[in-house]
Image (cartoon, grey):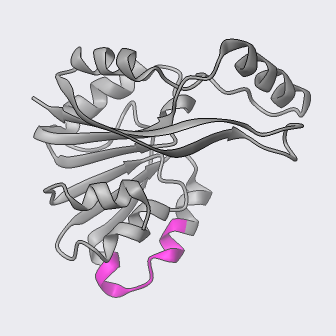
């Protein structure tokens, strides 16, 4: 079991949304561990969501899991409707982070948790080298070079989200061969912030 799933299991929740869920890895891993919880996977890629739906075959899971096509800056959910929001390997892809945090604050219940799992900031020369290699391979460049946790904590405070825990848990990989000539990676963190 991954570190972020172990951490999620310690949180009280009835409703969890995985923003940028892709093919549903996190939800598939958690759903059987929380029999009464309701799970929502949100992603802009409808084909990835189709694969996520295929992975959820058990009738009990189908009742408790929905996959929705959309983006994290405009979530089709009511205000104060979820207990836990996950941004796993997503934040560095979001151009307007403030909009995503505004939306997280809107849908998160008071006392709920925003979990961000992403990479720590890599040096700018290395980030620029990686993006040059991505462009040469006709791939889109990364938007953010990872994150300074102290700055991220300050940014979250502006949205009434107070950092309660930071767990450094391994390696975050931004780009790898064959897409670029070498591996670009940094430290992986899990930040847990509570809505006040």
Where, by quadrant of the figure, is residue 10 drawn?
Answer: bottom left
The residue drawn where x is 78% and y is 43% is 176
Where, by quadrant of the figure, is residue 78 drawn?
Answer: top left
Looking at the image, is 36 positioned above or below residue 41? below
Predominant secondary structure, magenta span: helix
Give left or right: position of 56 versus 194: right
Looking at the image, is 62 positioned above or below residue 168? below
Residue 55 belongs to magenta span: yes
Give left or right: position of 61 versus 179: left
Name the foreground residue: 106 vs 88.
88
| Residue 119: % across, % down | 53, 34
Looking at the image, is 39 positioned above or below residue 152? below
| Residue 152: % across, % down | 37, 20
Q: Quadrant of the C terminus?
A: top left
Q: Which residues are magenta?
A: 52-62
The residue drawn where x is 19% and y is 48% is 82
Q: Please state the total of marks drawn on the protein image.
A: 0
| Residue 106: % across, % down | 20, 31
Q: Residue furthest bottom?
A: 59
Where, by quadrant of the figure, is residue 192 drawn?
Answer: top left
Give left or right: position of 113 versus 74: left
Q: Quadrant of the N terminus?
A: bottom left
| Residue 139: % across, % down | 80, 34
Looking at the image, is 112 positioned above or below residue 103? below
Name the foreground residue: 50 vs 38.
38
The residue drawn where x is 38% and y is 15% is 151
Name the foreground residue: 127 vs 86.
127
Name the foreground residue: 64 vs 127.
127
Residue 188 belongs to magenta span: no
């Amino acid at each position: 079991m991954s570190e972020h799933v172990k951490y999620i299991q310690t949180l009280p929740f009835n409703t969890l949304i995985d923003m940028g869920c892709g093919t549903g890895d996190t939800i598939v891993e958690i759903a059987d561990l929380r029999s009464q919880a309701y799970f929502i996977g949100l992603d802009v890629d409808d084909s990835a969501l189709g694969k996520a739906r295929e992975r959820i075959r058990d009738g009990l899971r189908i009742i408790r899991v929905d996959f929705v096509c959309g983006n994290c800056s405009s979530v089709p959910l009511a205000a104060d409707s979820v207990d836990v929001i996950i941004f796993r390997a997503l934040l560095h892809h979001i151009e307007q982070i403030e909009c995503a945090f505004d939306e997280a604050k809107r849908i998160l219940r008071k006392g709920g948790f925003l979990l961000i799992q992403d990479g720590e900031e890599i040096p700018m020369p290395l980030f620029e080298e990686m993006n040059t290699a991505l462009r040469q391979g006709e791939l889109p460049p990364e938007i953010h070079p990872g994150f300074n946790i102290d700055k991220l904590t300050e940014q979250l405070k502006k949205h009434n989200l107070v950092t309660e825990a930071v767990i450094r848990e391994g390696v975050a990989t931004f780009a790898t061969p064959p897409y670029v000539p070498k591996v670009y990676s940094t430290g992986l963190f899990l930040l847990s912030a509570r809505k006040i």
